[in-house]
Amino acid sequence: MKIATFNINNINRRLPNLLRWLRAEKPDVVALQELKSTDADFPLDAIEKAGYGAVWRGQKTWNGVAILARKAKPVLTRIALPGDRDDREARYIEAAVNGIIVTSIYLPNGNPQPGPKFDHKLDWFRRLRRHAAKFIKQDIPVVLAGDYNVAPTPLDIYPTRSWDKDALIQPKSRAAFKQLMAQGWCDAIRELHPAKPMFTFWDYKRNRWPRDAGLRLDHLLLSPALAPRLMKAGVDRKLRGEEGASDHAPAWIVLR
């Protein structure tokens, strides 16, 4: 079972890239982020023609998350992260596919920091940890997949000082990720590639893709009930080099 997470950065604009990748790689489950599409504009017909069922939560201009399942319809279990009744942002969706709970997470960026946007990022992380702890307690097979907008360690960013003030690598951001992991989650990419950068994001600016000046922001965290099934993990880097590509590449795992 192959499960991927992919910040598509505008699903309608990148639809040809997405469909080519689905045909070539045939992932069984895909968590998408940053749809930049309303619910009504989600390209369901094209995705169904490619052989995938879908659940999604769109938002005009920004955000938006979805879960696709090959030759199946994901069973929607949640369309928002609990803990804030006033939260209207489409940043979390959760569905069951073949006996596994899969999320699509688009965690707030947090810039500029310090400030209210960074505080919101840390608060969102706290809500995620509270929700994630329930999965651990109930021993449910879960993949917390998504764009966490955190490069957890220095290995997860190319050698540079240019991002030092960015919310993606702040000590508090990294501490929040570490606290989530401490519940017992397995960082699948890092579990199988402990010494490789495994970048998933290359900013459009400053020639960063040709220079391989990347960051690892997209993660697949496995619950203890699922971690023993991990066989393979990787990043489909070549997709980032296509014409009209997202600034992210899909990260993926294979479970036995």
Image: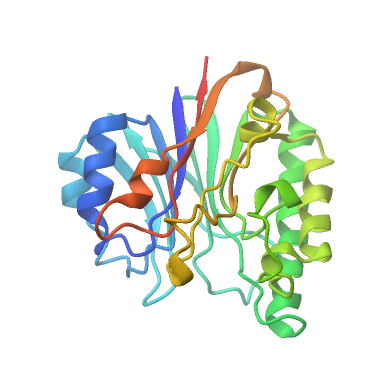
Left or right for 111, reference 78: right
Q: Say whether residue 63 is visible.
A: no
* Residue 230: percent from left, percent from top: 60, 20
Identity of the residue drawn at 37% across and 51% down: 240
Displayed quadrant of residue 106: bottom right
User: Against 68, is 39 above or below?
Assistant: below
Front one among 70 and 140: 70
Viewport quadrant of the N terminus: top left
Identity of the residue drawn at 70% across and 31% down: 194
Q: How is the image coloured?
A: rainbow
Displayed quadrant of residue 54: top left
Left or right for 232, reference 98: right
* Residue 41: percent from left, percent from top: 24, 66
User: Against 68, is 172 above or below?
Assistant: below
* Residue 190: percent from left, percent from top: 67, 34
How many discs appear? 0
Identity of the residue drawn at 42% across and 56% down: 210
* Residue 224: percent from left, percent from top: 73, 26
- Residue lying at the far top of the rendered structure: 256
Front one among 196 and 222: 196
- Residue lying at the far bottom of the rendered structure: 115
Q: Say whether residue 39 is visible.
A: yes
Identity of the residue drawn at 63% across and 28% down: 141
